[in-house]
Amino acid sequence: MIYISFFAAVTLFLYSIYVYRSEKKEPVKRRLDAFVGKKAEAEEDENDATAKPLHVRLLGPLWKDFRRGFKKKMQGEKQARLEVKLLQAGNPFGMTTFEYRLIQLGLILIIPFLAGGWGALSGFELGGIILSVSFAMLVAIILPPYYLKSKKKARSQSALRELPDVLDLLTVSLEAGLGFDGALSKVVSKKEGVLSTEFHRCLEEIRLGKTRREALRGVRERLTVDEINILISSILQAEKLGIGMVNVLRVQSEEVRDQRKQRAEQEAMKAPVKMLFPLVLFIFPSLFIVLLGPAIIQFVEAFSK
């Protein structure tokens, strides 16, 4: 027993000396690692800068200066309205306002130039070349806003189709005992689409410090759909007045489904009118030729004799 105690004491003494020496060297090691790490990062940045192609190193600063000057020339109100339009269109290709304006300017310069070159190579006269250039200029001016408008419309339609299922899942999550933010997180994790993306952004804004009211208003600004606007207004009003959120969402879900049924009936009523034009233009002439063609031929032959 004495030998075991002596051995344990010697072992603990040696271990304490080792720990003391390692802890004494640890601050010096941390400082050296920090210094060497910063030096290595600086060397890596320098190597990356020298490894870039020559045209990137030459044109990069010029491009930054041009971008900075172009942004300064853009008016604040127009830039804000353009940002809202891009958000409503879902930020296609991750475009910023600067990139959108640059693409718009490039189209205005390139498309008329190509149209004028095509007219000159095709042998058009001066009036024809001017007409083609004017038409190309009009197309270049109309094309970017039309693209944003079409993306906004498609996005709104997708959100409207997803709304009933999202409302049902949100209502079930609230009835199961989750809070509103937890129910939104469940919707984001279980569903995919435009509404799920917008609610995910709403949750991220809440985590970054925005109030729930401000985050939901942002969703309402990005999705210009009447049903979604009514839903968010109802949620904000229920939160303000202390009304049960489950009852509000259940009523909204029923109304949304009724409205979807009415839209389907409305589209069904439009179908006969839309079918009238292809019937008159394509199907009726073919039927007349098949049915009345032989009778007309016999009639003509009878009178020719």
Image: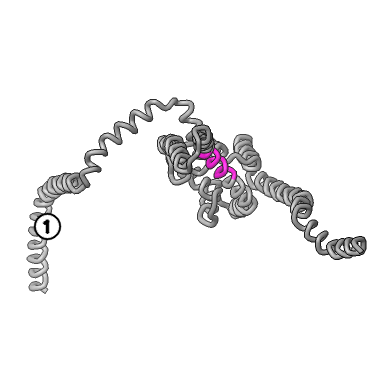
Numbered disc 1: secondary structure:
helix
Is residue 231 depicted above or below 291 in this figure?
above
| 218 vs 84, nearest the viewer | 84
- Main SS, magenta residues: helix
Mark yes or no: residue 92 visible: yes
The count of marks equals: 1
- From the viewer's perspective, is 231 left or right of 116? right
> Residue 293's x, y, as percent?
83, 62
Mark yes or no: residue 206 visible: no
The residue to which callout 1 is attached is: 19
Q: Residues within 10 Å of mark 1 (few under 14, many from 20)?
A: few
Q: Residue at horizontal 11%, vertical 51%? A: 29
Q: Residue at horizontal 60%, vertical 39%? A: 224
| Quadrant in the picture for the N terminus | bottom left
Is 62 contained in the magenta span? Answer: no
The colour scheme applied to this rendered structure is one colour
Q: Which residues are magenta?
A: 143-153
At label 1, the amino acid type is Val
* Quarter assignment of residue 4: bottom left
> Residue 129's x, y, as percent?
49, 35
* Quarter assignment of residue 61: top left
| 5 vs 13, nearest the viewer | 13
> Residue 40's x, y, as percent?
15, 48
Q: Residue at horizontal 29%, vertical 31%? A: 65
Q: Residue at horizontal 76%, vertical 48%? A: 266
Is residue 255 depicted above or below 218 in this figure?
below
> Residue 105's x, y, as percent?
43, 34
Q: Residue furthest front?
A: 305
| 69 vs 195, nearest the viewer | 69
- From the viewer's perspective, is 99 left or right of 125? left
Is residue 275 depicted above or below 100 in this figure?
below
| Quadrant in the picture for the C terminus | bottom right
